[in-house]
Image (cartoon, rainbow, N blue to C red):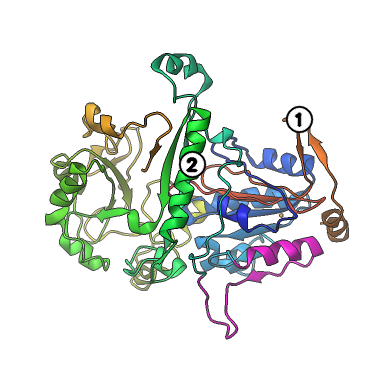
Amino acid sequence: MFLLQSLTPPEHEVLLIDGNAQPMDEAGIAQYVKDQNIGLVGIGAMTRMIAKAYRMADAIRAVGVPVVMGGPHVTEEADEALGRDGGERHCDAVALGEADETWPQIVKDAVAGQLKDIYAPVDAEGKDKKPSLKEYPAIPWNTIDLDQFNLLPKIVKPMLDRVGEGWGTFRIVPVESGRGCPYGCEFCTVTRFFGDSIRFRTNESVVNELLMLKARARKEKGQIAVFFIDDNFAIGMESIDPTNLKDVNKGFNKPGEYAAVLQRLAQRNVYAITSFIFGMDNDTVGVAERTLQQVRTWPPGLPIFGLLTPLPATPLYKRLEAAGRLTRPKHWKEFIPFAMAHTPLRMEPRLQLGSNSQSHRIDGRPAAWLPHQHLHSPHVFPRNLLPHDGKICLGKSNRPKLANNLQNGKRRRNRKTSTKRKAGKVERVSRRSVSTYFLNTKRPRLGGLKTFGSG
């Protein structure tokens, strides 16, 4: 979202609102759009939260505001979002792929009241175009309002003041360092969306951002933790079974080397967030416990467990569809956390994972303990990783009226914050990882949200 702020034409002021910090339901977001005279809303969401995104978009469009949607899911399912598949139309336009170069045109067309159905990043020959990250826009971290990103509740401030300076705030901020992945794992959307070649920002660009964040943390006597947005930083172990890894085109992973790699990282004070997938074709009952037995022998870290999910347009989805193994072909329209959407080969598809309820089990065992139990509390946050004073921890109907409103802007005061704002700010309101961009009907107001660490 911070990138879209920088990509928005300068005559529009951007205000970022994180739905995790300021959550809104459908009625709330619709009322907010009306109260703020917003003229355009942009929503970006991945498959797992697209049903929520569609409901939010429907509520916004119901009050006469156009919606533009983007992200991995609608890039592959544009007809679904636009109602071309026979279903309800959820948005006015879809931004395919990476919107670095199409976003300014989308804003311009919105101002003119001439939004197109599809915006695609293509070159003169009509081929898919990936933007270079070498000339990455500067993110004005020194002026962005980060108050909503403070994770420390006010109630704990007096206690932290006794600990010493440097704990007035604690914020997690995303910094993008690269895009693309050459591996093309069968279940993954990254390679298809971002391309099979890795594009990096310059070292200088990333370092400058980090230094700016560090200076701000010191000035405000708080902490800023950086979460790097780069799929090549992810440690996707996926399985401890080499056969599973080979089946999903990830045979380059060597389970026998996991422990040694993690140990070398730990010796350098790097503690990994590792991910695992259950429900692969060679998995059998007991896979969760067998995996945990291995994980418990490794250096401390934070493992993440999930079920194999056939995302649209992935090779996995196509393979399971051809084999007749999809049990819920449109599983994203009724999102059920940790429920299988296909028939596993060697386990029952009713197995579920990730609930604190004893009734939701995998391998016949309670799933409540899966994420954290094996972590010994003294090592969850190694002492030398704790942030100190000022340091960064790396870790969318009234078209004519709309067009007129978009072109006529003036200064106004927000009653809630008593802060003067230029008409045309970008506002983003979202909940859980649904990115929402608002365009003020007086002049464009746009914005975006991305859950830290989701792609």
Secondary structure of the residue carrying tag 2 is: helix
| Residue at 38% in and 49% down | 339
| Residue at 14% in and 48% down | 259
Crowd class of label 1 (few under 14; some 14 to 19; many from 20; radius 10 Å): few
Percent coordinates x, y for residue 81 in the rendering: 61, 62
Vertical placement of residue 439 versus 195, above or below: above
Q: Which residue is mark 2?
A: 213
**Earlier-in-chain disc, 1 versus 2:** 2
Task: Give whichever of 128, 90 is nearer the camera.
Answer: 128
Secondary structure of the residue carrying tag 1 is: loop
Q: Main secondary structure of the magenta part?
A: loop
Please name the amino acid that badge 1 sits on: Ser
C-alpha separation, residue under disc 1 versus residue under disc 2: 26 Å
Percent coordinates x, y for residue 451 in the rendering: 49, 46
Q: Which residue is mark 1?
A: 418
Question: Which portion, as a residue range, is magenta?
Answer: 101-130
Horizontal side of 382 relative to 160 (left or right) equals: left
Name the image quarter holding residue 385: top left
Percent coordinates x, y for residue 353 in the rendering: 32, 43
Magenta-span inclusion, residue 27: no
Task: Give whichever of 136, 251 is nearer the camera.
Answer: 136
Is any atom of residue 224 visible in this view?
yes
| Residue at 60% in and 67% down | 101
Is any atom of residue 172 visible in this view?
no
Percent coordinates x, y for residue 192 in the rendering: 43, 69
Please name the amino acid that badge 2 sits on: Leu
Vertical placement of residue 25 versus 239, above or below: above
Crowd class of label 2 (few under 14; some 14 to 19; many from 20; radius 10 Å): many
Task: Give whichever of 379, 432 is nearer the camera.
Answer: 379
Tag nearer the camera, 1 or 2: 2
